[in-house]
Image (spheres, grey):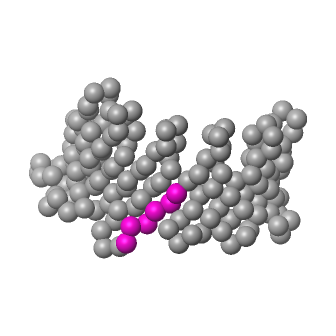
C-alpha cells in the first residue's frame, strides 16, 4: 500500500505473472475514492480497463483488441454519457503501423521507406508530414507542406 501527500492510500492487487488486476484509492478517512480494474487476455495484455467512483459508477474505461501478432487493432473509449469512441489500427505484414482510423472514418496513413523508416504521415484532412533520414537511418529533417522544418 502506498500513501500520497493527501494521505490517500492506494492498494494494488497483483495476479499471476505480476499482472496488475486492480487498484483501489482510499481517502484520508479510509473511504474508497476510486477503483480501477484490469481485465487481461491469456497473454496478459489489458483488454478492458475501468475506473469507477466510490458508488461503483463508471468514470472512464477502455477496451483494447489485439490481432494474432499481439498488436493493438482497436481501442474503444467507454466514457459514460457519450457514445463509444473507437480507433482502429491496421498493420503491415512486417509489423509497421499502416493506418489509424476513428469511428467517423477519419484516417491517418503512415508511409515507410524500404528499410522501415517512417517517411510520411497523411492526416485525415490531407495534411502531410514528411521525414528525411540519413544513411544510418537517423532522422535529419521533418517538414510539412507549408515548408516548415
Q: Is residue 93 magenta?
A: no
The x, y position of residue 108, in whole percent, is: 65, 61
Nearest to the observer: residue 66 or residue 5 = 66
**In the depicted structure, whether residue 133 falls above or below residue 78:** above
Q: Position of residue 75 (x, y in %)?
A: 45, 55
Res. 46 image quadrant:
top left
67 versus 148 height, above or below:
above
Using the image, determine if residue 50 lies above or below residue 10: below
Hey, which quadrant is residue 2 in on the image? top left
Q: Please provide percent x and percent y for residue 145.
A: 82, 67
Q: Residue at x 33, y 57 (%)?
A: 61
Q: Which residues are magenta?
A: 83-88
Quick check: 105 left or right of 148?
Answer: left
Which residue is pictured at 80% across the width and 44% down the height? 113
Can I make out residue 63 in this image?
Answer: yes
**Residue under the image location 22 percent in, 50 percent down:** 35
Tell me how many marks there are: 0
Quadrant containing the C terminus in the rendered view: bottom right
Q: Going by the image, does 40 lie left or right of 142?
A: left
Residue 18: which quarter of the image? top left
Looking at the picture, tell me which residue is in the foreground, 144 or 72: 72
For the stretch drawn in magenta, what is the main secondary structure?
strand
> Residue, x 76% and y 54% (percent of image)?
120
Where's the N terminus, which quadrant?
top left
- Residue 104 in the image: state x and y as whole percent: 53, 72
Can residue 7 be seen here? no
Amino acid at each position: 500500500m502506498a500513501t500520497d501527500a493527501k494521505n490517500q492510500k492506494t492498494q494494488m492487487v497483483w495476479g499471476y505473472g505480476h499482472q496488475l488486476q486492480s487498484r483501489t484509492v482510499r481517502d484520508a478517512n479510509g473511504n474508497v475514492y476510486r477503483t480501477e480494474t484490469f481485465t487481461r487476455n491469456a497473454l496478459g495484455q489489458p483488454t478492458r480497463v475501468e475506473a469507477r467512483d466510490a458508488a461503483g459508477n463508471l468514470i472512464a474505461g477502455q477496451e483494447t483488441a489485439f490481432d494474432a501478432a499481439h498488436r493493438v487493432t482497436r481501442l474503444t473509449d467507454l466514457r459514460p454519457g457519450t457514445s463509444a469512441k473507437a480507433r482502429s489500427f491496421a498493420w503491415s505484414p512486417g509489423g509497421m503501423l499502416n493506418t489509424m482510423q476513428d469511428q467517423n472514418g477519419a484516417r491517418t496513413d503512415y508511409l515507410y521507406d524500404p528499410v522501415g523508416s517512417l517517411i510520411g504521415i497523411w492526416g485525415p484532412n490531407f495534411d502531410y508530414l514528411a521525414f528525411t533520414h540519413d544513411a544510418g537511418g537517423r532522422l535529419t529533417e521533418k517538414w510539412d507542406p507549408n515548408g516548415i522544418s
